[in-house]
Structure formats: C-alpha cells, structure tokens
Amino acid sequence: MFEHYQLIDFGQGRKWERFGDYVVERLSPQAGISPTRGRTQVDVSWDGAQWRGEVDATWRMATPWFTLGLRLASGGQVGVFPEQFQNWHYIFERAIQADRPLKVLNCFAYTGASSLAAAAVGSHVQVTHLDGAKPNVNWARQNAALNGFEHIRWMVDDVMTFLQREAKRGNQYDMVIADPPAFGRGPKGRWQLHRDFDGLLDAIGRVLSDNPVAVILSGHDQKLPRAEMRRRAIACLAPLKIESAPLDLVAEDRKLYASDCVRLTW
Ligand SMILES: C[S@@+](CC[C@H](N)C(=O)[O-])C[C@H]1O[C@@H](n2cnc3c(N)ncnc32)[C@H](O)[C@@H]1O
C-alpha cells in the first residue's frame, strides 16, 4: 500500500503485515479460513493474550505525509490502523484544495494518524485531536513531536460530551473526522456504534461551520452496514456529495476487509 506498510498474507484467522522494519503476525477474525500462501518470516506475534518477540524502541512507520512511532501495545495493537491510508490521503488533499485556514476536529483520534494528515498541510490548518484515553493522546503527542507539528490542540474527553460542549460554546469546525469503535466504554456508559451513530451525526452537525470542507466517518459494526451508514449520514447532514467505500487492506491480488467509510462534502 505504501513503502513502509505491506499486508504480506492473511488466512486461517491470522494476518501477516510489515510495518517499517518488522513483520508482525496477529489474529484477524476477518481473515477467514482461506488458506495462506505459505510461511512468512515473523519478527513479533500476538496470540490473543500476549506478544512474542521484541521490537526496537525506535520502531517507526513513515507514510507519504507523516511518520508514526509504533510499539507493541495491549490488545494486539501497534499504534496504527493502516486501512485508514485512503482517508489520510483524502484529508490531506481536501485540506490542500480548500486553500484557506481550516479548523479540523479528529474524534476517537487514537495515536493521531488522521490528525497528522491534516496538520501536515501547514499551520493554517488548526487540528483538535480528541480521544478519551490519556495514554493514547500522549502517544499522539509524541508522534506530533516526531514530525515537528506544533499546531495541534490536545483534548482528553468523551467524544459526545466534548461535541455537546463545543456546540454550546459555538465552536465550529470545517472538517470533522470520526472513526468510532463498534463497542466501548465511555463516562456515560457503554458506547455501541449502531445504536449511537445517529446521536454522533447529530452532534457533528451542530459543530460544523457554515462552509464545511468534509466529514469523514468510518467504523466496523456488523449491525451498521455501509449502505445504512450512508443513508443515515445523508438524512442527518445533507451533504452535497457523498462517497462510501470499504477500507480494505490489499495483499497482492487479494483484499482483506477492515472497515467501512463514508465521506461527505459540501
Ligand atoms: C478504533 S480507534 C480509532 C483509530 C484512529 N481513528 C486511527 O485511525 O488511528 C478508537 C479510539 O477511540 C477512543 N475512544 C473510544 N470511545 C471513546 C469515547 N467515548 N470518547 C473518546 N474516545 C473514545 C479510544 O481510546 C481509541 O483511541
């Protein structure tokens, strides 16, 4: 997909990926039962409970727009969701095309990849990075420092609480990015994407500026198919244009579905 990332193989409930200098083997329910291509040389692997193998503290993955610091994290995460690649490209290109000062809000922002894609355009793009987990925001701050990006505002908060507060204050954004988990735990109880999606759309609508550039939504919840995401986004946000696509990872000629995405423009 890009020089520092490659989906090498997948199948039999596992996937093999190269991030920078390391090949990582992880469980992947979406990989299905299809056979794999054969043996792959693995540096580190996640068996569902723990990591085996070691990586250097300076593990990095460069994209065309920014560099991320990676590490072996809980839950088999490494600090990046590479299927978001097409969204990083989209965020960067839309912000360039707008050719004006922009306010961008990245919700559920994790280690900051989408925040960095927007910040890479220049300091006239003011990015607010919002995530409920302080360790993830700290990781994102380190990633921003790695790229020398200083124009990002860091928020540790529940997304719905923050959006409601921003709407009350009259704070508005020209681009909103939201990549919520299917399930989660927030200060207001359990988050469920299919149940809470309408509330999220409504809250995003309340902080959109009068001249919005884009809203980028992604997620993976079997109870919220892409066509339904699209239908609800049109009903709530009335975009001028909407495009929807799966976010796939590609191994040579085979695709591994990872998530769904809907992008709205005005
Ligand atoms: C799927 S990851 C997002 C990945 C990110 N968009 C990326 O591509 O790097 C989900 C993130 O949402 C955060 N999160 C989950 N529920 C939240 C909530 N209610 N409010 C704020 N952040 C939340 C988690 O801490 C986690 O960092």
Image (spheres, rainbow, N blue to C red):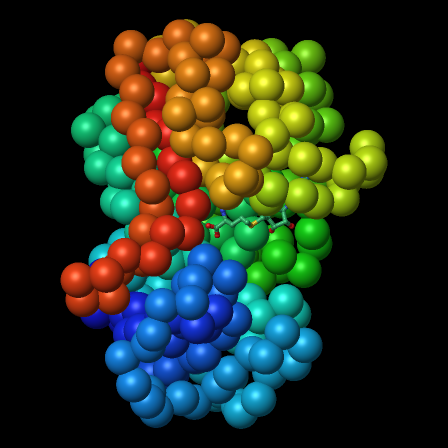
Name the foreground residue: 27 vs 261. 27
- The part of the image, by quadrant, that contains residue 266 is top left
Q: Position of residue 244 (x, y in %)?
A: 32, 30
Residue at 57% x, 62% y: name it: 139
- In the image, residue 22 sits, relative to residue 130, either above or below, namely below
- In the image, residue 182 sits, relative to residue 48, either above or below, namely above
Residue at 53% x, 39% y: name it: 222
Residue at 19% x, 29% y: name it: 97
- The part of the image, by quadrant, that contains residue 60 is bottom left
Quadrant (top left, top right, bottom left, bottom right) of the N terminus: bottom left
Q: Position of residue 74 (x, y in %)?
A: 65, 70
Residue at 35% x, 12% y: name it: 239
Residue 62 falls left or right of residue 103: left
Residue 121 in sight in this render: no
Residue 194 falls left or right of residue 83: right
Name the foreground residue: 215 vs 124. 215
- In the image, residue 7 sits, relative to residue 175, either above or below, namely below
